[in-house]
Amino acid sequence: MKPQIRILLYSTLFFLYIISTFLLLPIRQKLETDLYITLGCGFGLLNIIYAFAVLRWKPLLNIICSFIIASLALFMAVKFSDLHLFSNYDPYDIKTAIFSNALFSVIFWEIVYQIKKRKA
């Protein structure tokens, strides 16, 4: 896949992550579940759609990578927001967590893509 196409796809995924965060929060309130479970499953489904639509690998590999990336990105976003790096601009570190989650997921997808490309 050409770098320009990957950049376009990752940009789209980045913005979908940001938009879907705000769409998943009302679902969490209706289901009355834990925030991390709702976001993790929602991001996992978004990653599955991305993997099947864009990457077209084997189905089991798509599903496993999707949920691992969603979990790792969410964990890293929480840890990154705990650093309070942008407390002057984002007092509760919510925007920091949302943007870092989207950024970490894109980084992890690129890592998985490079690993898969090298093995093929």
Image: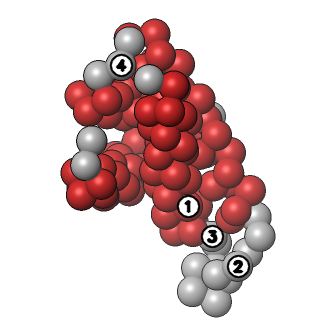
What label does residue 85 carry, if any? 2
Specify which label sits upstream in the sequence, 3 or 1.
3
**Where residue 106 sits in the image (x, y, percent)?**
46, 50
Amino acid type at circle 4 is Trp
Residue under pointer 1: 100
Residue 11 vs residue 35, the one in the foreground: 11
Specify which label sits upstream in the sequence, 4 or 3.
4
Asked whether the beta carbons under mark 2 and mark 1 sit within 8 Å of each other, the answer is: no
Tell us which disc is closer to us: 3 or 1.
1
Amino acid type at circle 3 is Asp
Asked whether the beta carbons under mark 4 and mark 2 sit within 8 Å of each other, the answer is: no
Residue 52 in which image quadrant: top left
Residue under pointer 3: 93
Relative to 72, 7 lies left or right: left
Q: Residues within 10 Å of mark 2 (few under 14, many from 20)?
A: few
Amino acid type at circle 1 is Ser
Asked whether the beta carbons under mark 1 and mark 4 sit within 8 Å of each other, the answer is: no
Specify which label sits upstream in the sequence, 2 or 3.
2
Label 4 to label 2: alpha-carbon separation: 37 Å
Residue under pointer 4: 57
Label 2 to label 3: alpha-carbon separation: 9 Å
**Where residue 40 sits in the image (x, y, percent)?**
54, 34
Label 2 to label 1: alpha-carbon separation: 12 Å
Amino acid type at circle 2 is Leu
**Where residue 4 sits in the image (x, y, percent)?**
24, 58
Q: How is the image coloured?
A: secondary structure
